[in-house]
Image (spheres, rainbow, N blue to C red):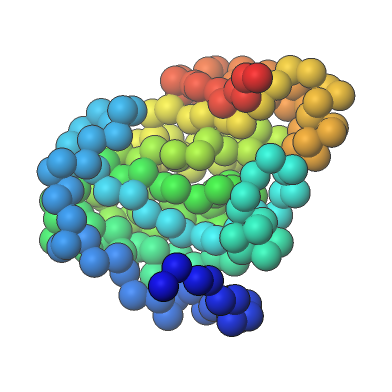
Amino acid sequence: RGDFYFTGERPLIEDLDNIPFPARHLLKLSSYRPPDAEHLPVASILTTRGCPGRCTYCCTNNLFRNRYRSRSIANVAEEIDEIIGRFKVKEIHIADDAFNVDKTRTIEFCEAIKKRKYKVNFEFLNGLRADMIDQDILDAFKSIGVKNVGFGAETTDKSILKNVKKNILPEDVERAIGLAKKNGFKTWVFFMIG
């Protein structure tokens, strides 16, 4: 009848590995064509929920209640096995809000993917944390065939970055882009305008 009732918040799922994989068989993956896709068909995957950042413009912390949780690498690799084996996907877009905030996990992910010798492209839909990019991570990305990396710069104005609690500096983004370019990656950057 058009009324809304709030029945209280539900507890967060603590073990993300217990969530079933998406029912991709119900989708027409051949019709999914993101503008930045280089190889079709494409599928997206979420390996974490939440973000340790507190950026004021982002809804992630409202959705996930200021909690960062991650799936096990084994569980993520199993989903990727299914995406490639069953759906013949050629490109996987990782949709995490903060994929590279845990360096150890990022490198473990790349090592698991490298062992499987997939012939697919990996992209990061939401970009990466510029202040958490280093040579080890770029080497790991290169080892699995990542060709380009992007970063959330948002602005080059330090006072705005401070006000929106981005917790990075323009120099962090410059350094990350320079290091990525030096390693042969194509780069792109998110900016907020207006």
Q: Is residue 22 above or below residue 168?
A: below
Position of 149 relative to 141 (above/below): above
Q: Residue at x 70, y 54 (%)?
A: 52
Vertical order, 129 against 9 (above or below): above
Foreground residue among 103 and 5: 5
Q: Nearer the viewer, residue 7 or 71?
A: 7
Q: How far from the left and from the top, in percent, is residue 25? A: 15, 63
Q: Quadrant of the N terminus?
A: bottom left
Tell me the residue at 84%/33% (across/down): 163
Place residue 189 in its image quadrant: top right
Locate residue 60 relative to residue 37 in the image: left or right: right
Q: Residue at x 13, y 43 (%)?
A: 30
Q: Check the image and report above or below for 45 versus 175.
A: below
| 81 relative to 171 in the view: left or right | left
Q: Is residue 149 left or right of residue 92?
A: right
Return the x and y of residue 137 as percentages of the image width and height.
56, 41
